[in-house]
Amino acid sequence: MADWVPDVLGEGFQQLTLPLGEDVEGEIVATVVRALPRPVPWWRPGGDRRPLADVDVLYVHGWSDYFFQKRLARFWNDRGARFFALDLRKYGRSLRPGQTPGYATDLDEYDADIAAALEARGDAAGRRLVLLGHSTGGLILSLWASRHPGQVDAVVLNAPWLEFQLGAARAAITPVVELQARLRPMEAAPQVDLGFYTRAQREVADPDDPVEVNPLWRPEQAMTVHAAWLRAVLAGHAAVSRGLNIEAPICVLLSARSALPTRWSDELTSADSVLVVDDIARAALKLGRSVTVERIDGALHDVFLSRPDARADAYARLDRWVRGWAHSDTALRRASTSADTPARRHPRRLVAARLPALRTR
């Protein structure tokens, strides 16, 4: 395997290229970016007492996206966790000349990317694994966690794309998309993106902690959607609708409301203009038996790129959930080493689902 090299994000970030073979468009690679917490001085009594000192986080980005959120990595590092972010094949750092950006025909294809990223962590013995996914990455990781029981300790989802925006029409749309995918897999699907979501992020950006984005890897208007890729996503939505079986506790963070991006308005700076968040909140309850849904007033689609007050609320809610999970999970692990304890007799299921009154879009 190649060596870790400095990443484009600068000091504190390194990247590793993960070879995954070839297809008709040439070499396939994924790229994992890591940010490690500051080591605890050897002389500190009690060792590393940070709550997530034994945790590895694996982040997967959304559609037309890649990893660039240094603030998010710092959140996990400050609590002791090792942070790893995966640029999937044909996205961001992994996109090669001549390749179709983001193209895949089945979301299961990303199993190889995820496996390579997990192996790249190095020694992970005794370490807990948290999956962190945004939008399409949240869908991909949810399906992966359901297919790989026992390998994940917690799942955190940032506005996961768990249902099609026209969810009520998904059953009618799917056969048409499937036919297009079989006959013309590379046919472009109709979509309207006026760049308002990108503009909303610029409008609320924090000048004291700027976020630099490569427009070649994250264009102002979303990348072209192809029929075969859309079929794969719809199949993922259908699987979620039938119900997944993620054993680990799940935290889902969502904006409190959605907004239609048909024209520019200030409303788009305080709402999710990509997904129908009420539909996502309902779908989230089908991921597993331990689901917490956090609705954040004023948040954008990526809740961690929202205006300062909404972003602070998102991080505060995540911190509360993660600390609670880490403490209870540690206690359960200790209890499970004792013979026939209540924790052993009753599997760990911390069921919590909070949904406000549902609104129509």
Image (cartoon, helix red, strand yellow):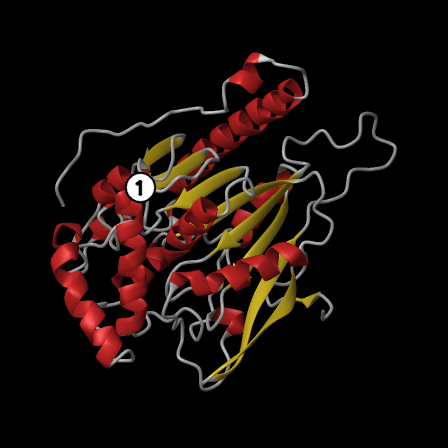
Where 96 falls versus 69 (above or below)?
below
Image point 48% across, 55% down: which residue? 60
Q: Nearer the viewer, residue 351 or 221?
A: 351
Tell me what residue is drawn at x 19 percent, y 73 percent: 179
As displayed, is residue 236 above or below residue 319? below
Taking the image as drawn, is residue 117 in sight?
A: yes
Indicate left or right for 16 with 306 as reference. Answer: right
Residue 336 placement (x, y as % from top left): 63, 21
Amino acid at the residue labelled 1: Gly
- Where is residue 323? Give x, y as percent: 55, 28
Query: How dense is the environment of label 1, judged by Cα within 10 Å: few (below 14), some, or many (20 and up)?
Result: some
Q: Residue furthest right?
A: 43
Check the picture and name the quadrant holding the C terminus: top left
Between 264 and 58, the one nearer to me in the picture: 58
Secondary element type, mark 1: loop
Q: Is residue 15 shown left or right of residue 184?
A: right
| Residue 67 showing in the rendered view | no
Please state which of residues 146 and 140 is positioned toward the viewer in this rendering. 146
Q: Residue at x 83, y 26 (%)?
A: 45
The quadrant the N terminus occupies is bottom right
* Residue 18: quadrant of the picture: bottom right
For label 1, the residue is: 243
Coordinates of residue 85 in the picture (x, y in percent): 55, 56
**Residue 22 horizontal side relative to residue 41, left or right:** left
Residue at left offset 27%, top offset 44%: 242
The spot of residue 34 in percent (x, y) is: 63, 56
